[in-house]
Each structure stands twice: as C-alpha cells, then as structure tokens.
Image (cartoon, rainbow, N blue to C red):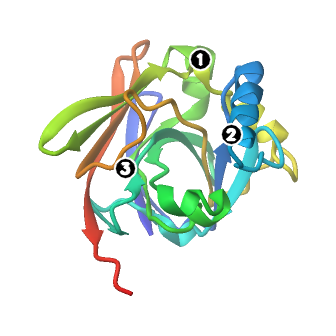
Amino acid sequence: MLTFHREAAGRRDTIAVAPEALVIAGWAGRDEAAIRHHIDELAAIGVPPPSSVPVYYRAAAATLTQGARLEVLGPDSSGEAEPVIVSLADGLWLGLGSDHTDRKAETVGIALSKQMCGKPVGTGLWRLDEVEDHWDDLILRSYAVIDGERVLYQEGRLTALRTPADLMARRPGGPEFPPGTVMFGGTLGAIGGIRPADRFEMELEDPVMRRTLAHVYDIAVLPVVA
C-alpha cells in the first residue's frame, strides 16, 4: 500500500492506494528530432533502438516504494526524477518519482533494468487538471549526494517533456488509465552525466500556484556475491 497526501481546490486529504499497474514512459521528450538523433548515435555503438517513440515499459507495481531507504544490488544504479501520473477512483493526480535504474543491467536490456530496482515515489499529489494549463511552467529538479557533496543533478521545466495527455493518447491500448495505474512520465538529462549517489533528493515546483512536491531517499548498496 502507498499513502498519499492530496491537495486539490485548497483542500487536503490522505488516501491509501494499492497500485495495480506500473508503466514507465521512456524517450518521452518533446523534441522528436533530437530523440531520433540520439537513437542513431546509440545505434552506432550497438545499442538497439526502442520499439516506439515514446516507448512504454511495464514494471511490477510492487517495485513502487515510499521508503526513505532504497536497497540496490551493486554500485551501478542511479536515480532520475520524473513526474508521475496516478489514476485514482476520482480522477488523475500528479506526483513525483524516481525511475531508479541499474545502469549495468541497462546495457543488457532496458526493460530488464526497469525491474532491477525499487521505484521511489513521494507522498504528495496534486490534481492533474489544476496544473495542465501551466504544465510547461512546472520545474523538475533533483540533487545527488556524491562522495559527501550535494550537487544539482537535474533541473528544467516540463516543456522538455510530453504532456500527460499526449503520453496517454500514444500509449498502446488507448488513453484510458484505470484506477490503480501509475505512470512515470519521462525525465531530464543529468547535469554532468549519469552517476551513482548515496542520497537522491527530488522536487517538482509549481511556480504558478507556489507549491512544491518533494521526496528524498538514501541508497544502500548491497554486495554482489558470486
């Protein structure tokens, strides 16, 4: 079960949710030409192209976690902040999550890597229809603590990402998202490159309505034993 603190129309409540499906949208940037160029670059070094753009990976809903500590196997994983769409009985809500991924497994298969790590999500939610009209103004940001130093890891407006309506319309099976469905909506590039950290902090800022969603988790590396 996940517990969310929701804010809508100036009111707040708390709800417990048992997620039933997890979808992770990849290659979700809005600049299709830039995405195609990057796909060609990766193909040149042997990385197979995605089956579609965007592509929708499925992962086990049980990997979603709100814990303050994430255990991972080996030192090759890293987080990436993403807007998260949560479908509930009373509509669609916007939250915040980290598509924490095993980068070593990613070289073998992206779909495989999505299953290797827990997927942290914050406890705060906003009604999606309250932010859709200023989606491009929302700011996604993350910090990573690396070797004891807290550094800005990601930062940018959501104008770089496809809107939830666009992502849902393109998804195989149609735009309908039954209650219990959670979808990660894409991420921004890492400042200084993708790298592991001891702690990952993320936030989604709404400068129009003057509010912020935030979540923090520590990464505990488990030894790889042959």
Residue at (39% x, 51% y) in the render = 78
Q: Residues within 10 Å of mark 1 (few under 14, many from 20)?
A: some
Q: Amino acid at mark 3?
A: Thr
SS at circle 2: helix
Would you place residue 69 above or below residue 132 in this image? below
User: Which of pointers 3 and 2 indicates the residue nearer the eye?
Assistant: 2
Instruction: Using the numbered discs, state the Cα–Cα distance from disc 3 to disc 1 in whole angstroms.
Output: 24 Å
Residue 53 - label: none
| Residue 86 screen position, x and y as percent | 58, 49
Instruction: Using the numbered discs, state the Cα–Cα distance from disc 3 to disc 2 in whole angstroms.
Output: 36 Å
Q: Residues within 10 Å of mark 3 (few under 14, many from 20)?
A: many
SS at circle 3: loop
Q: Which residue is mark 1?
A: 159
Residue at (70% x, 49% y) in the render = 47
Q: Residues within 10 Å of mark 2 (few under 14, many from 20)?
A: few
SS at circle 1: helix
User: Which of pointers 3 and 1 indicates the residue nearer the eye?
Assistant: 1
Residue at (51% x, 30% y) in the render = 188
Q: Which residue is mark 3?
A: 123
| Residue 116 screen position, x and y as percent | 51, 68
Q: Earlier in the sequence, mark 3 or mark 2?
A: 2
Would you place residue 41 above or below residue 217 in this image? above
Check the image and name the residue furthest to the bottom: 226
Residue 136 makes an appearance in the image: yes
Task: Pick whichever, 223 or 7, lies toward us.
Answer: 223
Q: Amino acid at mark 2?
A: Leu
| Residue 50 screen position, x and y as percent | 77, 47
Task: Pick whichever, 119 or 79, lies toward us.
Answer: 79
Residue 42 - label: 2
Would residue 136 appear left or right of 154 to someone viewing this image? right
Residue at (73% x, 39% y) in the render = 44
